[in-house]
Amino acid sequence: MKKFIDHCCEKCTHTKDNPCKDFVKCCIEGPVCHESSSCSARRKAIIDEVALNDQFIIC
Amino acid sequence: MYEKHLMICGATGCLSSGSNLVEEALVEELEKHGIRDKYRLVMGGCPGFCEVGPIIVVYPDEVFYCRLKPKDMAELVEKHLLEGEIVERLLYKGPDVVVPARFYDTIPFYAKHKFNVLRTSGIIDPESIDEYIMRGGYRAFTRALSMEPLAICEEVKEAGLRGRGGAGFSTGLKWEFTNKAPGPKKYVVCNADEGDPGAFMDRSILEGDPHAILEGMLICGRAIGADEGYIYCRAEYPLAISRLKIAIRQAEEYGLLGKNILGYDFNFKMNIKEGAGAFVCGEETALLGSIEGKRGMPRPRPPFPAQSGLFGKPTTINNVETFANVPLIVKEGGVLEFAAIGTEGSKGTKVFALAGKVRNTGLCEVPMGITIREIIYDVGGGIKRGKEFKAVQAGGPSGGCIPAEQIDLPIDYDSLNKAGAIMGSGGLVVMDEGTCMVDLARYFLSFTQKESCGKCTPCREGTKRMLEILDRISEGAGVPEDLDTLDSLAASIKDSSLCGLGQTCPNPVLSTIRYFREEYEEHITDKFCRAGICKELFTYRIDQEKCTGCTACARVCPVDAIKGEKKEPHEIEQDLCTRCGSCVEKCRQDCILVVPQGREADVSN
Ligand SMILES: Cc1cc2nc3c(=O)[nH]c(=O)nc-3n(C[C@H](O)[C@H](O)[C@H](O)COP(=O)(O)O)c2cc1C
């Protein structure tokens, strides 16, 4: 998972043709539809790469 | 993981002062040391302080480097990045700080800023949708998708958002009109024409945070029931257009534009239309005509665009900055947060392009209701070279001039209107004692006269006649009746023109006559221009007592009109002198005098 649009695992199905209502929330707080520490770590890695400091994220 | 992030101002202002060359030099230095991969370099949006560009802000250290040159990069890399030591000589210095300032919180220019619209400009990579989402982006849109359309209009009304493009009309009310207009096809249009000379607020927002505009337009689309939007942006803004195209592509890829967005029964298609850069095409009906492929000419209203706009369909048209405010309002808890800033009648912040004779020029975002004094002295750092503040032109060529006596006037829609100016889109040109108010009025009127589309006779012919009178006055051929003639021409142009261009273009003339009548009278009666600007009314002479023969004036004179030996007083050959004023600017001894007919004024300092 390099970008938020990439799927964290096979449980994520969001695409423009098969959209998920929770997509935006899920980018930062996800995964919303399942529990997985490795899936949430994947999202955190995207954030950590570019966050300038610890106030960078706004939920 | 990167060790540090280097945010380089990659907006048009800093690019023109060489930030791309600074970036190239930085990359070269990093490669030379074999550490390129450790650092993230972003050509980001505008941090506002154009006067001191090019700028690099280093995170997480929070260090603001300014006035950078490519040759500074070796030291920045070796000292700061490799040794962890701040390069003090590249920090902000100025008469307003005792010690070099390290970051935004200690630079006086930023003390009165309130970053709302410019919240992420300079902080994120404008070409990354992920970073926009990290900063809270598309949350307000997601919320709007689950709301009733009229409830969105209601929130925008309740927040008190007024259009930032000129007239200050209630945005929520405008949306409600379009929502209630019958018909299945409706449009959202973003006015990014930004034709005021010297204005670059909208360009900076588009370059620094393009997704904020898309999000504002999407929320509007949801509120009014539109499924298509157009961004009308002048072709002279290539960087803004390229960033918008990237943002649209990304939003499509992420399913934030297109069909059944995020699973809701909402579709939206975004288009960009490049304008050819005519001022009148910023007027909403002319703009809509231009998108339709017709000549950009205003048409009568009613019908207003909300009833019959683009291709005859109900349309909401808003300014860039208006749309950029929308996600802040529609996010959870946004209405109260937004309305807590500003004055009773003007809520939120306003972005201004501060130009003219202030020390700190650039872009500032301040709460509505801030006074002119605070903008000029706190943000702008006062008048250059210790001169006296004379007036400020607010609202561009359609705006008016506010004199020094009103320096404590709060800047909000209603106070500015009362003073004979307008908020306009946010241009502020500051003038000092060296500005001739007749010349200023002539400059702005010559702009609107050239930009008049020619459709209405009063605007087409009236502005030409007014300009002829102003030319005559500044050439010393004015007659006392001219002021009454200007007044009556202005009144009929304002009353009988079809669009806002004609209705407002006499404002600079009327406001300068209102506040600086004696200067007009001096030009007419005494053939005297106290500022030494109107070339027919004076000659330059070198004070023979004061001149040290330093030759600075002779070296700068473009027509070799200044003669004299080194260390001997110089003289000006009147037949050659074009009165360009270059010598006055250059002379350190203040010895170039303006010699008018009958009176003398020293403008050299
Ligand atoms: C001659 C003329 C030029 C204008 N130029 C602009 C412009 O460049 N940008 C803009 O947003 N509004 C401009 N306007 C105002 C628009 O007609 C319109 O009122 C505005 O886009 C509405 O958006 P708002 O309600 O968000 O302010 C101009 C108006 C006139 C009369």
Image (cartoon, coloured by chain):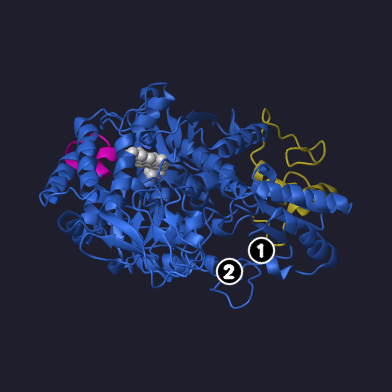
The image quadrant where one finds ligand 1 is top left
Tell me which amino acid carries mark 2.
Answer: Ile
> Nearer the N terminus, badge 1 or badge 2?
1
Vertical order, B367 against B266 (above or below): below
* Residue B58, picture quadrant: bottom right
Residue B429 in the image: x percent, y percent?
39, 55
Q: CA distance from mark 1 to mark 2?
A: 9 Å
Read off the residue under disc 1. Answer: B64
Which region shows up in magenta? B494-505
Chain designation of label 1? B
Q: Quadrant of the C terminus of chain B?
A: bottom left
Residue B498 in the image: x percent, y percent?
24, 34
Colour of chain B in the image: blue
- Classify mark 2 as within 8 Å of ligand 1 or not, answering yes or no: no
Residue B467 in the image: x percent, y percent?
24, 41
Is B497 magenta? The answer is: yes
Q: Nearer the viewer, residue B394 or B311?
A: B394
B126 on left or right of B178 = right
Read off the residue under disc 2. Answer: B107
Letter of the yellow chain: A
Q: Nearer the viewer, residue B97 or B339?
A: B97
Chain designation of label 2? B
Is B264 magenta? The answer is: no
